[in-house]
Image (tube, grey):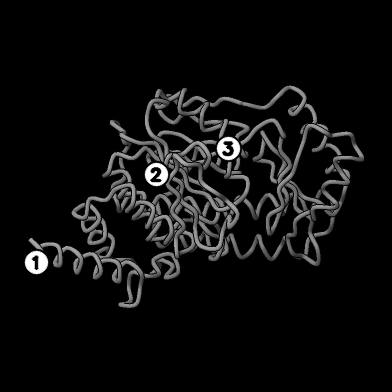
Amino acid sequence: MIARPNEMTWNAAMNDLAVTRAELGTARAGVVRQRFYTNWLEARNRSTGLMHAWWADHLDLKLVTDPRMVFSLDVDGVLEDEARGFSCTGAIGAAALRLLELGHVAVLLNTARSLSSVQERVTQFKLLGGVSSFGAAVWDGVFGQESSLLSGRGEMQLTHLRRVLRGDPEIVQDRQYEHSVRATRMVNGEPNPLPGPAARSLLQRHGLEDLTFWVAPGHTDFVDRSVNKGDGLISLTKQLGLDGLPVAAMGDASCDIPMLRLATSAFVPAATLPSYLPSRRQRLVRSRFLGERALWEAACHLVPDSALQRQVMTAISEINYPEWFPPTVSQGLRSSGGMLPRLKTALVARLTNKEAER
């Protein structure tokens, strides 16, 4: 249960985040370090939850009950980033979710994150569901049901891998991950991934041929190689009864390609997936922006109603942020040089030009 976001809960969350990070940096290797690592992850999750609860309250996000389209959305690097010491979406990402909701676009998260993380985001952002652990599990947010897509061999090998990793005193695991394994190697007090050669050697050495891995900046994810984000999306849309709707998708890494292939409209942020080529039936939009800015641009493509865009821009720009609110989360809105004011100016100019042409 996430506490209500206010000055007291936010300051407490920031204090916990600083304390747990400092404790992790100096913790001894082994079981003790695992405990401090878990404490730090929990502090990060609390900070994320408070920010997302704040956006949901102030934008009055609602469930899309009559969707005209499905939008499969990656989380890390697209909806959220880690620049604030914890992961969350900011003003622009929240605005994009609101615009998509008003345009009757059903956003389904599709991420490497754990099923519990997907559940929290789906609940807070009033979404219909999400795909977790690279397609290993899906969450139906309408009926509150989870489904595992793991193969029997993949599930057994993940269990074996967890036991193996517990024997390495330098490695800590995110225990929220039930359908994949997220492992971090601590080096001089800093979280690091297991490099590709080391991860590959580990799997080969223990005969875990049904698993594969993905290396991220602070961790390495091990996953059943029989699952992918595309199959996860197919399973979830069928479960929700949305499989007859057109599909759009947005991602920024090679693990997103299976879901991008399913979409009639695919969106990628700037400088990502340069070798991706759309099929003849697919519209591919390569943004000039990264992260939330690219997401806002995608939302405007999917909801081209300029009145709705203007409505969301106005609502976001008029929010009165409390003093405790982190400026990096609202960045781009307070100053005249921010993105949304520029977009709003451009939109108004475009509308004015169109009216003049009439």
- Badge 1 is on which residue? 356
Question: Rounded to the nearest whole Å, what is the CA distance between mark 3 and mark 1?
Answer: 46 Å
In the rendered structure, which amino acid carries the disc numbered 3? Lys
Q: Label 1 crowding class (10 Å Cα cut-off): few <14, some 14-19, many 20+?
A: few
Question: In the shown orientation, is residue 212 left or right of residue 307?
Answer: right
- Badge 3 is on which residue? 229
Q: Going 24% across and 70% down the picture, which residue do you hit?
A: 345
Q: Going 43% across and 39% down the picture, which residue do you hit?
A: 264
In the rendered structure, which amino acid carries the disc numbered 1? Ala
Question: Rounded to the nearest whole Å, what is the CA distance between mark 2 and mark 1?
Answer: 39 Å
Q: Which mark is residue 125?
A: 2
Mark 2 against mark 3, which lies toward the viewer?
Answer: 3
Q: Quadrant of the C terminus?
A: bottom left
Q: Which sits earlier in the primary sequence, circle 3 or circle 1? A: 3
Question: Rounded to the nearest whole Å, what is the CA distance between mark 2 and mark 3?
Answer: 21 Å
Q: Circle 3 — which element?
A: helix
